[in-house]
Amino acid sequence: MLDASRVILGTYGQAHVDGVWQTNINKLEASVEMEKRELNLVGNDWKVHKRGIKKGTGTMSGYKVTSDMIRRGFNRFEIITKLDDPEAFGHESIRLIRCTPDKIQLANWTAGEEVQEETTFTFEGYELLDPIVAN
């Protein structure tokens, strides 16, 4: 049976951009999609799939506190994302390699509201640095 205390909460997530902890970030999503080619082979009544190239995409969002993302422009950066819930079996760290922003948000504000900042990006590789393993 699942021990509910082992379920990881995003509250303990961290994002480090080029080694600097982004304490203003409250959401990070990254995923890899693999292109697959469908093949029809003689003598086979199932479609088979040939693995193709991969594409990494992500979104990082939170509160605006600096002009760091504007200053970076479209230069590449590296993200290390970490989940470290104290009740979990351990922590997980993943390095996102050669991240490049899709667009740069120059202004997005409304009077009386916190200013949110969102950066969508692509990346060209990843490395699982610290896996979570059940004890």
Image (tube, rainbow, N blue to C red):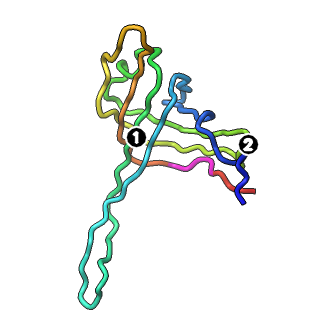
- Tell me where residue 127 appears, x and y as whole percent: 51, 49
Q: Nearer the viewer, residue 116 or 20?
A: 116
Q: Quadrant of the C terminus?
A: bottom right
From the viewer's perspective, tell me whether residue 20 is left or right of residue 36.
Answer: right
Q: Residue at x 32, y 72 (%)?
A: 49
- Tell me where residue 54 appears, x and y as whole percent: 35, 55
Q: Nearer the viewer, residue 94 or 86?
A: 86
Residue type of the residue flagged with mark 2: Glu
Q: Earlier in the sequence, mark 2 or mark 1?
A: 1
Q: Residue at x 59, y 43 (%)?
A: 93
- Tell me where residue 87 appears, x and y as whole percent: 73, 42
Residue 109 occupies which quadrant of the picture? top left
User: Residue at label 2?
Assistant: 87
User: Residue at label 1?
Assistant: 58
Q: Quadrant of the N terminus?
A: bottom right
Q: Residue at x 25, y 75 (%)?
A: 39
- Tell me where residue 27 appears, x and y as whole percent: 49, 33
From the viewer's perspective, tell me whether residue 129 is left or right of residue 113.
Answer: right
Using the numbered discs, state the Cα–Cα distance from disc 2 to disc 1 in whole angstroms: 27 Å
Residue type of the residue flagged with mark 1: Gly
Magenta-colored span:
127-131
